[in-house]
Image: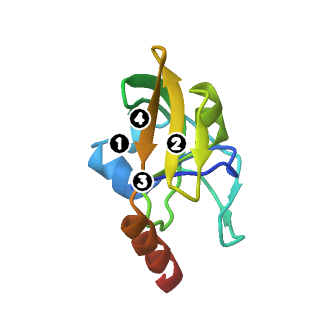
Amino acid sequence: MVLADQGSGAEIMYPDLFKGLKLRPEDLACYDSPLIGFDGKIVFPKGQIRLPVQAGSEIMEVNFIMVDAYSPYTAIVARPWLYAIEAVSFTLHLKVKYLSRDQVEELVGSQSMARQCLVAAIRH
């Protein structure tokens, strides 16, 4: 469950994805700039890691900032990633469209999954 957030300026990775990829703390590079979470609280990152991300047929290296905080999402991809693949995000329709090899590709989200994430975030 990845959130494509046009309002964020950094790609974020949460503990579930970090553990799921079998990454270790020593895999992280130093990143010491604090972030402000959605709840307005300051979050201190554990580090940064560069990983390949595949969207459709496109693979791109992305710098993720690893934070040890609760999120119903496993990661957030933000403006840098959206700009890099020259994507257009349609939040109302939960779609991201981008040009790849002379054709338009589309990533489609799930309305029910988006609702579940919202409810989980509110309950937390």
Q: Which mark is residue 27?
A: 4
Q: Position of residue 105 (x, y in %)?
A: 44, 30
Q: Amino acid at mark 1?
A: Arg
Marks 3, 1: nearer the viewer:
3
Q: Amino acid at mark 2?
A: Val
Q: How many marks?
A: 4
Marks 2, 1: nearer the viewer:
2
Residue that numbered label 2 is attached to? 96
Q: Which mark is residue 6?
A: none
Vertical order, 27 against 45 (above or below) = above
Q: Amino acid at mark 4?
A: Asp
Tell which circle, 3 or 2, labels the residue nearer the N-terminal end: 2
| Residue at image point 48% right, 66% down | 71
Callout 2 environment at 10 Å: few (<14), some (14 to 19), or many (20+)?
Answer: some
The CA span between labels 3 and 1 is 29 Å
Residue that numbered label 1 is attached to? 24
Callout 3 environment at 10 Å: few (<14), some (14 to 19), or many (20+)?
Answer: some
Q: Position of residue 43 (x, y in %)?
A: 64, 61
The CA span between labels 4 and 3 is 30 Å
Instruction: Report if the CB atoms under discs 1 and 4 are less than 8 Å apart.
Output: yes
